[in-house]
Image: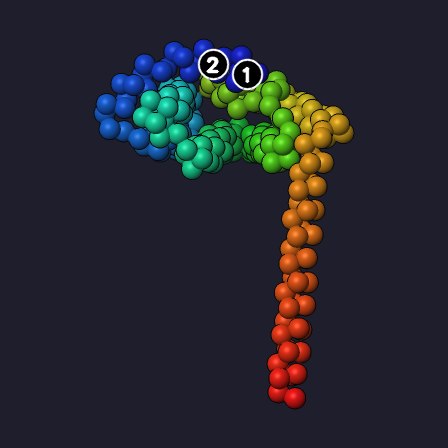
Amino acid sequence: MFDGRFRAPIEKAVRPVGQLLRKTGMSPDHLTILGIAFAVVASFAIGNGALRGGLVLVILAAVPDMLDGALAKASGTSSQRGAFFDSVVDRVTDSVLFGGVAWYFASEKDPHLVLLPMAIMGVSSLISYERAKAEALGLYAKGGLMERAERIVVLCIGLLFDSLLVPIMWIMLVLTVITAVQRFVQVWRQAEVSSTTQEKRDVRQGRRMTRISARTSRRQLSVESRQRRRNRNG
């Protein structure tokens, strides 16, 4: 939801910062690594009960994640490798942060509550998979009530008001499940009428038939070659 509505204005706002960072010689990968380093420290802070300290560190972890794209565009280094690295690190960062929440629940609350952030991470992984698989099929799978940006914002609210952290986690879980269902329905409806999916299947089928034909031709040539050698020897 935030991603669709606010991505363009945020990218426009941080564009000058990307230009400034380019002059420092930093690369987008440096910012990505810096972000996950802050996330690891935030996880330890949260796990040890320093929730407001963890909140500050979560915000610090989010800043490099917001700026690495601006730096990549300013320096002309946008690439598929960078996009892949950033996406993988986002998943790792989420796991680290919610792992810190699970550690806090195990230490300070009911140990059974450990399952709550773990469930959120499980459903979040399903959301990411739905998008990745849909895009591989040429379909669209974005949006929903609780995407990654929303989860980080809601987590920050829970860290600020520690007495509300548990109910906020429950709310996050419910909204994350709803988002997973939304994306499933979105892709399911597209797949029913998508010509792109059929075209991809036709292309794969055509390639498969080409390979089979090529193998058959090679076998036929091999048989004919052996037959000619026998005829010469005979």
| Horizontal and vertical percent position of residue 138 | 63, 32
Q: Residue at x 62, y 26 (%)?
A: 141
Q: Position of residue 178 (x, y in %)?
A: 67, 22
Res 73 → quadrant: top left
The residue shown at (72%, 36%) is 198
Residue 7 picture location, percent across and down:
48, 16
Quadrant hosting residue 75: top left
Considering every residue shown, the one lying at the far bottom of the view is 234
In the image, what residue occupies the spot 39% across and 29% down?
A: 78
* Quadrant assignment for the C terminus: bottom right
When asked about the image quadrant of residue 14, the answer is top left
Which type of secondary structure does the marked residue at label 1 adopt?
A: helix
Q: Disc 2 residue type?
A: Ala
Quickly name the residue at label 1. 4
The residue beneath circle 2 is 8
Q: Amino acid at mark 1?
A: Gly
Report x, y in % for residue 184: 69, 28
